[in-house]
Image (cartoon, coloured by chain):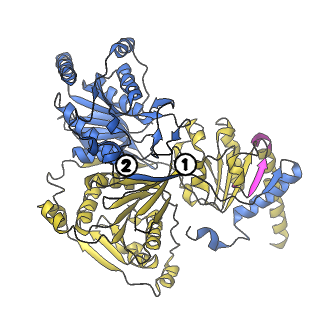
Chain colours: A blue, B yellow
Amino acid sequence: MAASLWVCLGRRWLQLRKEVAAILTHIVVCLKQVPDVSDMRMDPKTHTVVRSGAATIVNPDDQYALELALECKDRWGAKVTAVTMGPDGAERAVRYALRQGADAGVHLCDRAFSGADTLVTSLVLARVVHKLAGAAPVDVVVCGDKAVDGDTAQVGPGLAARLNCALVRQVTGVQAIEADQSALLVERKTRDRYQRVLVPLPCLLTVVPGRLEVRYAALPHLVRAARAKVPRLSAQDLGFSPQQVGLAGSATRVRKVSTVSFPTRVGQEVDSTEQGLREAAITLQTWASGSGQKEAGADGRS
Amino acid sequence: MAGAESSANTGTRHSEIWTVMECLDGKTTDASWGIAAKASDLAEGRFRTAAVWLSSTLKDDDDKVRKAQAVGVPLIRQIQAEPQPGYLLAAEHAERLVCLARKHKPEVILLPASDWGRTVAACAATRLETGLTADCTELRLDEQGLLEQVRPALSGNVLATIVCPERRPQMATVRPHVFAAPRLSPGDLDRQCEGKRRVDIVVEPASLLVKCGERPTGSKRLCRVVEDKKIDAPDLSRAAVVVAGGRGIGGKDGFGVLAELAIQLGGVVAGSRAAVQSGWIGSAWQVGQTGQTIRPRLYIAVGISGTVQHLVGVQRARKIVAINRDPEAPIMACSDLRVVGDWREVLPKLIGELKALAHRGQRGVQPNG
């Protein structure tokens, strides 16, 4: 199965080379199928996320990451390969990418992968990128900045560290490519800064929403995606033993999961009558000005 | 060669807790000092705490030695590295941290969970092949000295306690402003330093980077910043009064009313995650676990039910006021003042009362003045 993938990838690549003198060769996009955050549970035994049964979506940041890759493809003729790791249902992320216009996709699917922390996730993804680079050299790896379920923003930088390539986080778009094809000019936006950064190739970009608009899928892509058979790779296919990946290979363990309780405050209740709100206004003003309150309490360490 | 060095060191005790200090505009951030202070609390004589700077360009004009002394950090570690203005340096800083960590083998490394800190931590933890927990809101040491890293998970619906049992160092990024920096004005500083231990300063030479082999290819991975603009973004963590709106506000227009209330109280407007995701207010204005953590004098939550991820970010407010139609909303139990009602009716009246108060206040002052 894997062999046929490489043949297919190779053919597609040759085809692309004929179509345009590609400036970029190969972009790999990492996508994650995530539980819909409003519909999630934890397994009380393993303390990991229960993914079966919950509604899932393609992680929002990853949708923008794919869009960025597709824009690069439109402008500079790169081949786009989508990669996802996860259980059976995660194949949807690859299919989504194919519908949007990705050229190929791989689904890393193995029971042994489950329970992976960010350290081992980046390990597996790095191995896949190396493997994909065998078909066509990879110039850019694109990831969503963070996933809505884990919210760590650690896999992208970790992957860059493993691939030993340049890294820019929080990218909102690619503006240009250097004439000698040695670097990309990207825009990034952090909480309080807008920057344009010249990033040498090969590089890894993590993408946040902002400037990009996710495209509507074109009909030919829809048809192709519906028919496509998404190739699967197991831990063994990537040369891992089960102990190296998933929960077994992870450095961190969830020791305890607890429901959260916050210290309740003995507050007064006010109804929305005129009298009630008049009193409330006086209270608010007192609290806002900080008068009549001890300074020490709030500024001490908690 | 690196392998030989590390095997020679396997017997050494991991005995230091490091806080990696973030510098913005040549000044160490308050969030970093807050974490350093927490680290020194944690250590309790079991470990030695160190504040670590990854750049040698920082001048001593922000009194870092005395501040370290004041928060009870007895050791400063720093690396002598060439300044490289105009580049994105988080990845480079990560390499410096890796080299320092390989040499000194700390037990724990903490960083602020800022953009910079998260990038440095993720790159460094991967190179060190160790565990990293993102955005912790509580840290504890258990009896064995294992670091319990607590963070909200599943979109803030539960709190997960995460440990890194075998690999070292144990690494975590810590949510900024969860641990408050002690107030360190110049006057306080002298007083707070009295009777505290002297601070040792250890500066590593730049040759450490070459020795540990992290930079074999030179600066081929350096990203040059060709344009850098500051965007208007509120620092909610410093605001004395914050008025936030949530899903219950129902649209952009409602935030205008919230702004009026905020003006009356000398505060700023913010939004919950639901409000930000609906596009009613910019993400820079988001409070909660996925936004900013705040500790104002007064926090007013309007039309916010109070999910865990939200409460995590606002529970340190001195006073919390909830305005909500639903008397059973979780935020109500965590409030000092609860107003049950529709904000569309409550807020205009409340703003009117506040205006009247201000007016009366002015009238009262004039005859005396």
Q: Residue B236 appears in which quarter of the rendering?
A: bottom right
Q: Nearer the viewer, residue A131 or A156?
A: A131
Chain bearing tag 1 is B
Q: Position of residue B71 (x, y in %)?
A: 46, 75
Query: Residue B2 versus residue B25: which sits nearer the camera?
Result: B2
**Callout 1 amino acid:** Val
Residue B235 vertical placement versus A95 (above, below): below
Query: Label for residue B129?
Result: none
Which residues are the magenta region? B334-345
Report the disc number at residue B158. 1
Q: Amino acid at mark 2?
A: Asp
Q: Label 2: chain?
A: B
User: CA–CA distance between discs 2 and 1?
Assistant: 38 Å
Residue underneath mark 2: B228
> Can residue A159 be seen in this snapshot?
no
The quadrant of the rendering that contains the C terminus of chain A is bottom right
Residue drawn at point x = 40 percent, y = 25 percent:
A92
Q: Estimate the x, y position of residue B60 in percent, counting from the top left.
A: 36, 74
In the image, residue B31 above or below residue A245: below
For residue B108, say whether it is visible.
yes
Residue placed furthest toward the front: A45
